[in-house]
């Protein structure tokens, strides 16, 4: 196979458009797009032209001769996808949507949220002449989870920010950062100043366990823990009890794997990344030797993706153990269970830190006086409902795990957006094709829930923008009021570029991608620094 898609795939389908022989799938509009773990190159039709590599924003596509030892399993993973998913119903080629002809006159759109969903929406809009987009965010920095959610040891995935730099450099694009919509500005303020508003505010809160002791110190949201080690201004000054030999993560999705890797990583290796300095110092002084990931259901139902499991299995200085394997589960039932079976068969190495993937175990209660001291867990049994849903049912068999740190990682929830309807059950804003009403739209997790990958936001944003442009063409949007506009102390693109320069320069001095500024005051000071004068 000449080219291979590897772990850092963001699934935004840029490579699909670049490929001249339609050998990368699932493509937009095909079964599996947006839900498959990643995209895959078909070895039977790839012609080794390399066009996909130039289109990929995260350097995920590589010649098979350039794969590292840790990436070699992706060779078979790409090929096996087509054995199981022949895509007999796929179209001969994914058709690139043609640029629409819009009514004469300027179209002004506010986008609330500067993460991937918001920036992809801006990109879709700016493909059309006469469109101006202003992107708002409450933080002084853009990029959302691409900056504050991707683990620092996954620097390849963070390369997607170079695509965002290209988007924000387009004519008609502007930032207003450090602005709280709902406080500094209202929904009505935005509507008065623009033809339309797109909300791409994400899902910022976590789901609760709902067990006794959850409020004890040492019981932490994985969302907050990730924000801490990534230097998010909201959480950068937090402290976490890392003086415990065992940490427990409730959940087994990709975020849970991220947390486990960071807790067991060599701090010297992390020192070469953009991890928060405060978090790095705490990890150096920490005593964590084992991280247990609890999954209520079995290995076949694990939420993590195969690429992330491959990355975990490639760790050189950390043991990965598997516990709770159902007796009736065939180890080669899926690619995921095959990999887990291989991990289960490994011989532990004495003295190494370890990550334990423990299945069929459910949290019961946290115990301790002034802080978490232990977690009681119950063994579970799997039962299949009439509709095929596999449920985990707790049994009477319980066990006590001594620990001083328990991180819940069982999903995200969006917060209601002031001025918009909100469905409490799905934690999303009700919409039709992204349209809440003419002039008001949603994109990303606030639209569809916390599903998909970074690139999934691209097709999500395309659908929303199509709805917006339909309304503009039909005359359903209200004209902005003359002179209306926000008058807040916001940071613009030049201010963000000044912050970016300051962080990169500090990183270059230490051999790191960047050293993040983690408090609002420091960020605003860096934003005020003028750009260096051009020589000559």
Image (cartoon, helix red, strand yellow):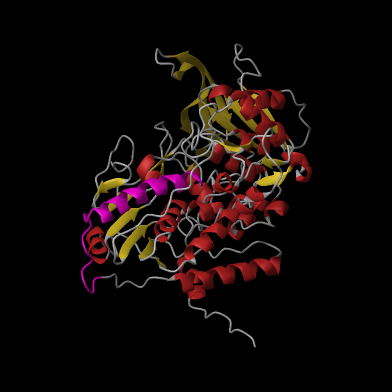
Q: Is residue 401 visible?
A: yes
Q: Quadrant of the N terminus?
A: top right
Relative to residue 389, is residue 35 depicted above or below? below
Name the residue rendered at 58%, 38% in the picture.
Answer: 39
What kind of secondary structure does the magenta stretch mostly adopt? helix
- Residue 4 position in % (x across, y down): 68, 40
Q: How many marks?
A: 0
Q: Quadrant of the C terminus?
A: bottom right
Relative to residue 140, is residue 238 depicted above or below? above
* Quadrant in the rendering for residue 281: bottom right
Relative to residue 84, is residue 239 depicted above or below? below
- Residue 48 position in % (x across, y down): 71, 44
Instruction: Tell which of 68 and 27 is nearer to you.
Output: 27
Name the residue furthest bottom. 536
Name the residue rendered at 57%, 36% in the picture.
Answer: 25
The magenta span reads 455-484
Instruction: Tell which of 443 and 143 is nearer to you.
Output: 443
Instruction: Tell which of 76 and 428 is nearer to you.
Output: 76
Does the magenta portion include 58?
no
Q: Is residue 404 visible?
A: no
- Residue 40 position in % (x across, y down): 61, 37
Relative to residue 277, is residue 294 depicted above or below? above
User: Image check: 153 left or right of 465?
Assistant: right
- Residue 310 position in % (x across, y down): 67, 35
Name the residue rendered at 47%, 66% in the picture.
Answer: 170
Does the magenta portion include 456?
yes
Instruction: Tell which of 414 and 532 is nearer to you.
Output: 532
């Amino acid at each position: 196979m000449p080219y291979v898609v590897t772990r850092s795939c963001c699934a935004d389908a840029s490579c699909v458009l670049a490929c001249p022989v339609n050998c990368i799938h699932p493509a937009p509009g095909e079964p599996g797009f947006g839900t498959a773990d990643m995209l895959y190159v078909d070895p039977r039709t790839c012609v080794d032209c390399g066009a996909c590599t130039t289109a990929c924003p995260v350097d995920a596509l590589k010649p098979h001769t350039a794969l590292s030892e840790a990436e070699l399993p992706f060779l078979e993973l790409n090929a096996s996808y087509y054995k199981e998913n022949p895509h007999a119903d796929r179209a001969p080629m994914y058709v690139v949507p043609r640029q629409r002809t819009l009514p004469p006159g300027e179209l002004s759109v506010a986008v609330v949220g500067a993460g991937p969903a918001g920036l992809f929406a801006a990109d879709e809009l700016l493909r059309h002449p006469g469109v101006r987009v202003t992107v708002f965010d409450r933080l002084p920095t853009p990029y959302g989870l691409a900056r504050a959610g991707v683990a620092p040891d996954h620097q390849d995935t963070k390369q997607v920010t170079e695509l965002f730099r290209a988007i924000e450099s387009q004519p008609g694009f502007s930032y207003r950062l450090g602005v709280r919509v709902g406080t500094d500005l209202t929904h009505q303020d935005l509507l008065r100043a623009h033809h339309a508003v797109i909300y791409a505010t994400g899902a910022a809160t976590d789901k609760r366990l709902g067990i006794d002791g959850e409020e004890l110190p040492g019981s932490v949201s994985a969302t907050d823990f990730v924000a801490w080690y990534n230097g998010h201004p909201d959480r950068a000054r937090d402290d976490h009890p890392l003086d415990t030999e065992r940490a427990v993560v409730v959940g087994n999705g990709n975020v849970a794997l991220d947390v486990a890797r960071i807790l067991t990583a060599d701090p010297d290796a992390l020192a070469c990344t953009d991890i928060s300095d405060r978090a790095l110092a705490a990890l150096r002084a920490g005593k964590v030797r084992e991280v247990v990931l609890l999954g209520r259901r079995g290995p076949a139902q694990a939420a993590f993706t195969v690429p992330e499991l491959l990355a975990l299995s490639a760790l050189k200085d950390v043991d990965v153990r598997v516990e709770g394997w159902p007796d009736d589960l065939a180890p080669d039932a899926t690619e995921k269970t095959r990999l887990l079976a291989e991990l289960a068969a490994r011989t532990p190495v004495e003295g190494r830190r370890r990550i334990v993937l423990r299945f069929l175990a459910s949290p019961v209660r946290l115990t301790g006086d002034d802080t978490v001291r232990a977690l009681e867990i119950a063994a579970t049994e799997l039962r299949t409902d009439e509709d095929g849903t596999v449920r985990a049912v707790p049994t009477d068999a319980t066990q006590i795990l001594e620990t001083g740190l328990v991180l819940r990682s069982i999903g995200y929830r969006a917060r209601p957006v002031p001025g918009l309807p909100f469905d409490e059950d799905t934690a999303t804003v009700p919409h039709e094709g992204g349209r809440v009403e003419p002039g008001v739209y949603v994109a990303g997790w606030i639209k569809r829930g916390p599903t998909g990958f970074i690139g999934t936001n691209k097709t999500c944003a395309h659908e929303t923008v199509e709805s917006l442009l339909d309304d503009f063409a039909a005359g359903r949007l209200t004209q902005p009021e003359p002179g209306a506009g926000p008058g807040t102390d916001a940071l613009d693109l030049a201010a963000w570029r000044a912050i970016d320069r300051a962080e990169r320069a500090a990183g270059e001095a230490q051999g790191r991608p960047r050293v993040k500024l983690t408090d609002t005051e420091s960020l605003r000071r860096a934003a005020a620094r003028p750009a260096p004068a051009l020589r000559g």
